[in-house]
Image (cartoon, grey):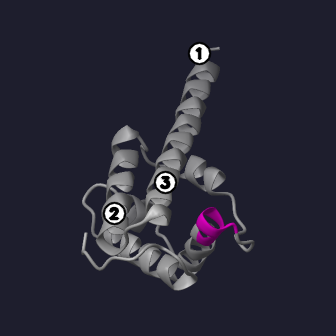
């Protein structure tokens, strides 16, 4: 982390974080294909949603509209989303935060990303377990 790194404190910082993160994601060998090939993310539409999402998470602002859990649950129906994929997403996120920022809000962003990953993985695993139970019944 650069010694001159500052904390996340504005929408401009959120944009820098999100753009830097998704630039890395697009080129990542593990999760890049999920975003690029399976989900076929429309980046022009997705990035503003992610700016609003992280701004709401970190600064408590209104403006995010969406249901990330539903989106990821649907995606998990099309591609395996295991602990490996969530760990990679988290590693790329943490690396991006640390590359640009340092401070309490940067640490909060990494903590919240960890909780988001755990929650999503829990619900996706529960969906898979329920589907297996229904098939056996």
Give whichever of 73, 113 is nearer the camera: 113
Could you tell me if the residues under marks 1 and 2 are in contact, i.e. CB atoms within 8 Å?
no
Please tell me whether mark 3 or mark 2 is closer to you in this view: 3
Q: Which residue is farthest top?
A: 137
- To which quarter of the image does residue 19 belong? bottom left
Q: Nearer the viewer, residue 126 or 76?
A: 126
Distance in Å between CA atoms under marks 1 and 3 = 35 Å
Q: Are marks 1 and 3 in contact (CB under 8 Å)?
A: no
Say which quadrant the N terminus sits in. Answer: bottom left
Magenta residues span: 55-60
Q: Nearer the viewer, mark 1 or mark 2?
A: 2
The image position of residue 132, as x and y in percent, is: 56, 23
**Label 1, label 2: how far apart the Cα atoms are:** 34 Å
Q: Which label was assigned to residue 32?
A: 2
Q: Residue at x 55, y 38 (%)?
A: 124
Prevailing secondary structure class for the magenta stretch in the rendered image: helix
For residue 43, say whether it is visible.
no
- On the rendered structure, is 78 left or right of 65? left
Q: Upstream in the sequence, badge 3 or badge 2?
A: 2
Residue 106 image position (x, y, % from top left): 44, 64
Crowding around mark 3 (Cα neighbors within 10 Å: few <14, some 14 to 19, many 20+) is some
Quote the CA–CA distance across marks 3 and 2.
Answer: 18 Å
Q: Is residue 64 magenta?
A: no
Check disc 1 and report the residue beneath it: 136
How far across and how far down the image is residue 47, in percent? 53, 77
Q: Which mark is residue 113?
A: 3
Residue 101 shown left or right of residue 113 in the figure: left
Q: Residue 130, position in %: x, y? A: 62, 26
Local SS, label 2: helix
Q: Quadrant of residue 60?
A: bottom right
Left or right: where 22 falls relative to 45: left
Tell me: residue 135, above or below residue 34: above
């Amino acid at each position: 982390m650069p010694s001159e790194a500052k904390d996340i404190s504005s929408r401009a910082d959120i944009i820098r974080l999100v753009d830097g993160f998704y630039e890395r994601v697009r080129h990542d060998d593990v999760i890049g294909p999920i975003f690029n090939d399976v989900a076929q993310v429309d980046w022009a539409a997705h990035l503003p949603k992610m700016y609003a999402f992280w701004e709401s998470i970190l600064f408590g602002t209104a403006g995010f509209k969406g249901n990330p859990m539903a989106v990821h649950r649907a995606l998990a129906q099309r591609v395996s989303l295991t602990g490996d994929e969530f760990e990679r997403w988290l590693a790329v996120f943490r690396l991006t935060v640390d590359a640009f920022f340092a401070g309490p809000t940067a640490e909060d962003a990494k903590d919240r990303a960890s909780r988001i990953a755990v929650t999503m993985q829990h619900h996706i695993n529960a969906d898979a377990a329920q589907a297996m139970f229904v098939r056996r019944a």
